[in-house]
Amino acid sequence: MFNDPAVWLPLAFAALMGLSILIYVVLDGFDLGVGILFPGASGADRDRMVASIGPFWDANETWLVLAIGLLLVAFPIAHGMILTALYLPVALMLVALILRGVAFEFRAKAEASWKPLWDRAFFGGSLLTALTQGYMLGLYVTGLESTLPTVSFGLLTAVCVAAGYALMGATWLIIKTEGDLQRYAVSRARLALVLTMIGFLAISVATPLVSPRIFTKWFSLPEILFLSPLPITAGLLAVAVFIALSHLPDSRDRFRWVPFAGSAGIMVLAFFGLAYSFYPFIVPDRLTIYAAAAAPESLAIILVGALVVVPVIIAYSAFSYWVFRGKAGELRYD
Amino acid sequence: MDSPIMDPTILARIQFAANISFHILFPTITIAMGWALVFFKLRYRATGDMKWMDVYHFWVKVFALSFALGVVSGITMSFQFGTNWPGFMEKVGNVAGPLLAYEVMTAFFLEAVFLGIMLFGFRKVPGWVHTLATVLVAGGTTLSAFWIIVLNSWMHTPVGFEIRNGVVHATDWFAIIFNPSMPYRLAHMLLASGLTAAFLIAGLSAYRWLRNDRSPAVLSAMRFGVGVAAILIPIQIFAGDMHGLNTLKHQPQKVAAMEGNWETGPAKPLLLFAWPDEKARENRFEIGVPYGASLILKHDPQGVIPGLNDYVGQHPPVAPVFFAFRIMVGVGMLMLLVSWGAALWLWRRGEPHPWLARGLVAMTFSGWVATLAGWYVTEIGRQPWLVSGVLRTSDAVSAVPAAMVATTLVVYLLVYAALLAAYIATLFLLARKGAAGKPVETGPTPHPNAFVAAE
């Protein structure tokens, strides 16, 4: 089957798109989470919070552009179907992303009297982005239809994704800050962890219930044996993060990486669970990646570029994180 | 009968046009501003004169702000391809897809990642790495312009493909990338970016000068802006003329609309003003220069100019193309006048006259006006086609209910209006802060605002 490019190319692109979404969720997840935690922090702490993500957010958001771009170029029919079905939440998310993105600049450069307003735009934009993305996840899981049950489920997943991003943001701040701000981050991380786990549980229960196909994929022998490590590992990671959080902040700043790494691990596992559930569908139960794929010759020319360029992107992104390693200080242009 | 206001195609077009018009303002600045920053940085490294770092640190802030606005409005566009024009990707996705993918992969990440180092890494990396980061950001913005112009040009002059089962399939990527209108459009756009940035730099510097900021950095930046504008504008007029001739060859109906010419024929005048009446298919209140259009387009007073009546039902709406073209050319002429006048004055006297400075301030955003007008000429001029001869705009529009498009359109317009006002106000605020003698550029002034401590 792998001799036929019409088979392996769509799969390769689904994997590449999945990778982009995953990287986006982890990286912009912590950016957006920092924004969500804004209201509880003081003025000086807010500047430090922004400084902890300032050099990265733009590149992190680009993974969303790559993901949506790959959906657009590799699965054009699915792109149209999904985005027209999610027209309003997408529009809301875009407005939220706009507000969040420009607030980075305006809060630092506009008149001082306007700063509280841009701070609110930063918080509101971050929160609304997370909520709309969670809502879209809920609608996607339940088959892209807007009925009372699916919308209610979407609202639940909206809160849970926001909590998941807040968890990423709080655990990122634990790494990048110290003192009161770090303590604040630890306390919010605990709350966010609980909400996140409730959310994952809700999605894990709901997906097999709405789709008999997904139910069979998970709850039949021998699949259930191969798959059981997935939720078990996620649970163990959650426990590890919880234990680490109860020991933080540490006087010598040990274990500060544990909550972030554990939370990212939970996100990765959740992502693979979802990917397994929906494969081979790109529009749940309606359109497979094979039926939606663009022409093989066009996909091949993108794949060649992607195989060369994506490792380079990852390398220079890593370089940027290395340059701005350590505790977030003042961000200076000069 | 449906009101035209609630026609989904019109609404989708207004929404996309509003978004893309808002978006283009910022890349038009950053594409060239990136190279200006490289120039300032290299001047500093060559001369060791701190004034060049002062110039750099002032304009890097303008760059950062413009870049952020470009990024967020660009993300909106990548989604609106799907929400507004699903038919576009379904029909020509096999060509448009790889071009967009290469733009994201080769340009977006490059500029986004190195922007962080360029903005905040001055003290964290060696000087040459910082300069390299600035070069990579500038290169990234230019590369991004290249890919998107390739796609846009292909939509005007599509080649290198075949249609199988109603879907476009690429057959020759070299032909697609170097399609007939690409070199002209790319040159025209890059020069437009250079002029936009040059007049912005000259205008804001003149504003600081008028507020009694006599630091050497301000005068140097003003001279740089005026000098670049004076050099680029004649090249732009030449490139624009070449682009027009290329359009005459491939899209004669667009040129007919630009000239407001209804009947094909020789010895056509260059219309300075007219009111094209599409119902009567004639112009009212015509004022023209005899033989002008024939001379410009055919370099012969008896040259035959194509007329709109040869393309009934196949040509764009005439009035918007006709007027947008005159606005673009008019602003271009004004740019020539102001930049050469200012260059001559600064060269002779060294310092600007207050009235010259006021003139430069008035021209601060002239590049935006000309660029938008130019894009309206070429994009409205392609109608009724989305991809010339391949896909009609009305066949690509999504089935989203008009009311939903109208609602989101209002929200987008409100957000864009607020952001544009905030952007312009902030540019002048940054200039005033600079003029107030605050240590904008240097000095380790601790500031509660950690993000941008440079103020």
Image (tube, coloured by chain):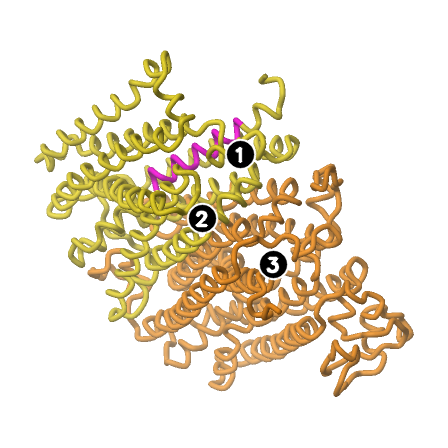
Chain colours: A yellow, B orange
Residue type at mark 1 is Leu
Quadrant location of the N terminus of chain A?
Answer: top right
Answer with the quarter of the image where residue A111 lies: bottom left
Q: Are marks 3 and 2 on the same chain?
A: no
Residue farthest top in this picture: A222
Q: Which residue is mark 1?
A: A287
Q: Chain of mark 1?
A: A
* Viewer-nearest of discs 3 and 1: 1
Name which residue lies at 25% across and 50% down.
Answer: A36
Q: Position of residue A306 (x, y in %)?
A: 53, 33
Answer with the quarter of the image where residue B408 lies: bottom left
Q: CA distance from mark 3 to mark 1?
A: 42 Å
For the magenta stretch, what is the residue range? Answer: A11-27
Q: Are marks 3 and 1 in contact (CB under 8 Å)?
A: no
Q: Which mark is residue B190?
A: 3
Q: Position of residue A116 (x, y in %)?
A: 24, 65
**Left or right position of A197 against B202:** left
Residue type at mark 2 is Leu
How many numbered discs? 3
Q: Residues within 10 Å of mark 2 (few under 14, many from 20)?
A: many
**Left or right position of A258 against B434:** left
Q: Main secondary structure of the magenta part?
A: helix
Q: Chain of mark 2?
A: A
Name which residue lies at 52% across and 51% down.
Answer: B83
Q: Which residue is mark 2?
A: A86
